Image (tube, rainbow, N blue to C red):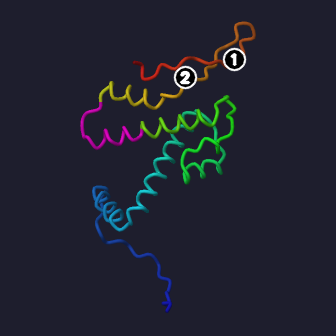
Amino acid sequence: MTKNYTWKPIEPWDLKWHRSHLPDAFKAFRDDLPEDVWRTFDERCAREWSIETSLIENAFTLERGITIQLIKEGFISSLITRQPNGLSGEQVTAILTDTQDALDGVFSFVKSDRPLTTSDIKQFHQQLMKSVETYDVYWPDPVTHKPTLGKKKLDKGGL
């Protein structure tokens, strides 16, 4: 049996809302989800954040379709083609896994409710860059003064 719905304009919301209400609203949403649905959602979010973080750092490039597959199915190296920077699918997968581990560490840290130190930041960076050995740098060619691409060893976490 279907109901007939009649369109109505959006009415003003007369409830007072504040961002401090968000945790309770989220908990109510979370409590209504079956555990397997929540776990799948949580795992996919973690993979998406890892991919986005690594893409922001220009660690590799991924086509949209591959990105969607990696989010849905997991970090499967055979889905990843060789990168323009020479990284293999296995190397990209290692970077993604390290990034996910670093993000998990950040979330655990936030839950601990303790002050952030320089040492903490260096440890997060070290975990994030665990599988990255070098980064691209540009410097002027001594003769032509045109930018020349090169590699430099990465100082992981400055430790």
Q: Nearer the viewer, residue 140 or 84?
A: 84
Mark 1 falls on what kind of element?
A: strand
Relative horizontal placement of residue 132, taking residue 89 as reference (left or right): left
Which residue does the image show at 45% across and 57% down from the upper left?
41
Image quarter (top left, top right, bottom left or bottom right) of the C terminus:
top left
- Check residue 19 for magenta coloring: no
Which residue does the image show at 37% across and 38% down from the upper left?
105
The residue sitting at the top extreme is 143
N-terminal label among 2 and 1: 2
Q: Residues within 10 Å of mark 1 (few under 14, many from 20)?
A: few
Q: CA distance from mark 2 to mark 1?
A: 19 Å
Percent of width and height locating residue 20: 28, 56
Which residue does the image show at 49% across and 38% down from the upper left?
97
- Write the start and end of the magenta stretch as one range: 103-116
Residue picked out by circle 1: 148
Residue 33 placement: quadrant:
bottom left
Above/below status of 18 relative to 108:
below
Mark 2 falls on what kind of element?
A: loop
The residue type indicated by label 1 comes to: Thr
Percent of width and height locating residue 119: 33, 24
The residue sitting at the bottom extreme is 1
- Check residue 105 for magenta coloring: yes
Residue picked out by circle 2: 133
Give the main secondary structure of the magenta stretch. Answer: helix
Relative horizontal placement of residue 104, taking residue 135 as reference (left or right): left
Percent of width and height locating residue 81: 68, 39
